[in-house]
Amino acid sequence: SSSPTIIVMSTKGETTTGVGSSRSALPLKLSQLQNFCKRDPAGYKEDYDAQSRRLVSLVGILLLSPNADPSPSLVELIQFMAAVSSSSYKGEESDRVAALLMDLLVGSSSNSASNNLKQQPSGSVPLLQTTLPLAALQLHRDIRKACVSALILMRNKGAVPPLRLLQLFFQLMAVVPDKNLRESLYHHIVNDIRNINKNGKRDEKLNRTIQSFFHRIVVASANEASPGGEDSPADYAAKRAVQMTCDLYRRNVWIDERSVHILASAAASPNSSVTSRALRFFLNIEEAMALDQKSSEEKTWADSQTVDLHLHSKKTKARQRQVAKQVKNRMKKQHEREGLLEAQREDKGVEASKKLFPAIELLHDPQGLCETILKRIKSSGSNTYKFEVKMLMLNFVTRVVGNHELTLLPLYTLLQRYMGGHQRDVTAILAYAVQSCHEYVPPEEVYGILKTIAHNFITERCSGEQMAVGINAVRAICARVPSVLSQDDDDYEEGDTREKSTAWDVEAFVRDLAGYTKHRDRSVSIAGRGWVNFIREVYPSLLQ
């Protein structure tokens, strides 16, 4: 009978067969040992333990001198231990390897980081630490990348809980200035949350915990940040948390009120980067999601139009059934597409137009949020926020006010400051003024905007384009606030002669704008005719 095989460890970390073996005494590489451990975990447990002791010693040496060049075989050994422990020895052994790699990333040799993670309850919200020891910052880039890849591998196999890696990866993203590492960590976190909620299997408890963690990061950044200051690690973590929430909302993973609350807290942050990311989400997310849906529908339509007729193959009954099924599917998709096109052509009415922004509809306290942002715009100096950020703030505040029909009186006074004839992006300011108006706005607040527009745009010293834009803006504002055109003498008492004398002369204003129907400029005359047609529909008595 043949003698049994004896596994001997070499000094280089490779496994060899003994003298009494029937096989040749060749070195056994880590890839081969990984295959053997997968086939026979109990038989090769001693070899795995030897490699585990070797990893512990190399990590201990590396922590003592992080500046030194690491061993060439350490990266391969890390990948081996992560793959084998998460598949063949899942449990205590995989937890020990994950804790060792986490301690190496945070520069701790006493398992303090892993013990803190283990002591946290499973449902508690983790805390973000924005500092790392010097040993973690001086760690070699290849070793850090290998540890992160190994932990991601173990997480994909279910050997590491998601919250442990979430806290560690956010700490690395906030502190370590490695662009490639940050991108890989970001994509892993987003994909991990998508996989948790994949195929309708949603873990609501875990989702709430992760959302609470993101909200805590955003709030901590808002409390520490100052307008116009430099970005700190907490600010960078807040930007990443906001971007992740935006991506998950766009992918229809997190579309609940908690996600919108995270972004609303980010919109009120003093940090301009965090604020602009959240504001762009509220202003553009519906268009982005509609574009994604349209591209998906076009791809599905293109796939359904492809029919394999088997023109150059043998005609069999099975292939004939396949062709008939594909043709039937194509006709079904065509009928569905025609029905969608007809539904899009129908006028949904005003109530449907208010539901164009579902993310804004989910805001918990829109009045308080708009007051906070408006106060920040008015109190900030010229160098605190860039002009583009202020425009984003104005666009968001006016859209929320018009969508929720809020009463925010200082907003209309602020808009008049930006309505100069030579103001930068003045057409956008006029659009913001239009979308901030609704039927519950007091007419006295709208009179000032109409007077400013008439003085700066609807005069002979302005160009034809400016005059047409001004007339169209006045028509849109009056359409949203019909009470501006109604002037009843009963509203004034006998003693209010002074207020009545300075009141808004609606009839004269309407007739002045109606006089531009015969203007020499074509665009101005078209705008004037539009104004006259609008008045005929709403208050025809003003034209008599």
Image (tube, rainbow, N blue to C red):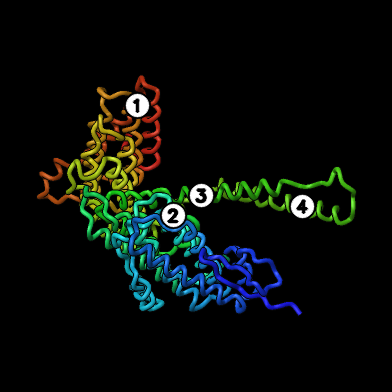
Q: Secondary structure at mark 1?
A: helix
Calculate the distance from the C-alpha at mark 2 to the C-alpha at mark 1.
60 Å
Residue 326: numbered disc: 4
Number of other residues with Cα within 10 Å of mark 3, as a class: few under 14, some 14 to 19, many 20 or more: few
For marks 4 and 2, give the CA distance: 51 Å
User: Residue 236 sits in which quadrant?
Assistant: bottom left
Q: CA distance from mark 4 to mark 1?
A: 55 Å
Q: Which residue is mark 2?
A: 142
Please give the residue where the numbered disc 1 appears in the rendered image. 465
| Three-letter residue code for mark 2 | Asp
**Residue furthest toward the front?**
19
**Spot occupied by residue 132 in the image (x, y as percentages of width and height):** 30, 62
Task: Give percent across and percent down for residue 362.
Answer: 39, 61
> In this figure, which residue is indicated by the disc labeled 3?
290
Neighbourhood count class around disc 2 (C-alpha, 10 Å): few under 14, some 14–19, many 20 upward: few
- Secondary structure of the residue carrying tag 3 is helix
Q: Earlier in the sequence, mark 4 or mark 2?
A: 2
Residue type at tag 3: Ala
